[in-house]
Image: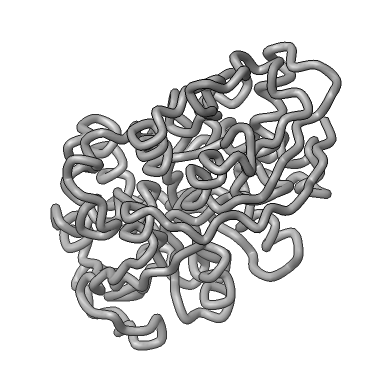
Amino acid sequence: MTARTTANTGSRRTLALVTAVLLLAVSGCGGSGEGGENSEGGSGKGLERAAVTVAATPLVDSAALYIAQERGYFKAEGLQVRVRPVQQSVQAIPALANGQVDIVAGGNYVTMLQAQEKGTLSLRVLADGVVLAPHSMDVVVLPGSPIRTAKDLQGRKVAENVLHSIQSLRLDAILEEQGHGAEPVDYRQVPFPQMAAALEKGQVEAADITEPFLTDAKRRLHARVVVNGASRPAQSLPLSGYETTKGFVEKNPKTAAAFQRAIQRAQRDAGEDRRAVEQVLPDYTKLDAGTARAITLPGYPASNSPERMGKLIKMMAEGGLLKKRPDPAELLFRAEPA
């Protein structure tokens, strides 16, 4: 389904909660050194690297990184992890490509896969970060809106964070599944932090919004959900992960495997006990504890899945976001048996 893409300048009004989320000052875990400063072979665990530098986004997607740090999972693997905060995963791509950072945490898969297709980097995924869960990213409207169902979104102005992205592709797929009709949605580009304000001012008629902004819109505007953003066929769609490069895993296979084990252990904690996520969110997102308890969390898979990655690649290719379909099994890093 083709969307009309009219840019929206958005609103300059920034909510206090949103400002807190974006204006981060994440302290470097274990130091703030550059990737080039990582010492070699000092772990005592037979690793090629004693330390790695991770560029981390300030999103719920990166929760396992901080859980693993606080619970000593990296230390148990003989690995020191240094964190460098970045606002968006796209900002970390040049540093990843030239070796200034070794891994990106919470890296948006669409951005990373497109960077690989352009030849910017040769991607390898160490672990999935998050997958869509029911009501973790929904389409909302104001309480008095005449929009009630997916069909009512035909021709309506709907805020999307980035135009021509997996966000709009997955919403188009959901709307088609629910009998949306022939007239396309009029997508408007509005950053997540500004969506509630744009909705309130009538600049858009609906907003395809994620957490924690979703909870804030519900609380402040009494926004009403009209489409569950994780409906078929977008159920459990992978959104982000822990990515590195082919060169890194080939040169440091044992280090990559150690990081993968620690992260997937923390992913399991996050998936089985949301309190593990709630406890770390205030530290690196600046969300208050009450909001951390209130938001709807995405899914945190504890293992990689070629089928899951293949679903994303298929949707991207069919929507024109990828010209070629990379092999999911080749993208996902698999540690050699000990």
Q: Is residue 36 above or below residue 59?
A: below
Image location of residue 235, percent across then percent down: 54, 24
Q: Residue at x 45, y 44 (%)?
A: 128
Q: Is residue 18 above or below residue 168?
A: below
Residue 170 seen:
yes
- Report how many numbered discs are placed on residues in the image: 0
Outermost residue, bottom direction?
A: 37
Front one among 162 and 329: 162
Q: Is residue 277 above or below residue 142?
A: below
Q: Residue at x 33, y 45 (%)?
A: 264
Q: Residue at x 43, y 57 (%)?
A: 14
Q: In the visual, does 111 lie left or right of 294?
A: right
Q: Residue at x 65, y 30 (%)?
A: 171
Image location of residue 32, percent across then percent down: 28, 80
Image quadrant holding the N terminus, namely top right
Image location of residue 162, percent across then percent down: 64, 51
Front one among 75 and 295: 295
Residue 67 seen:
no
Query: How has the structure been colored for display?
Result: one colour
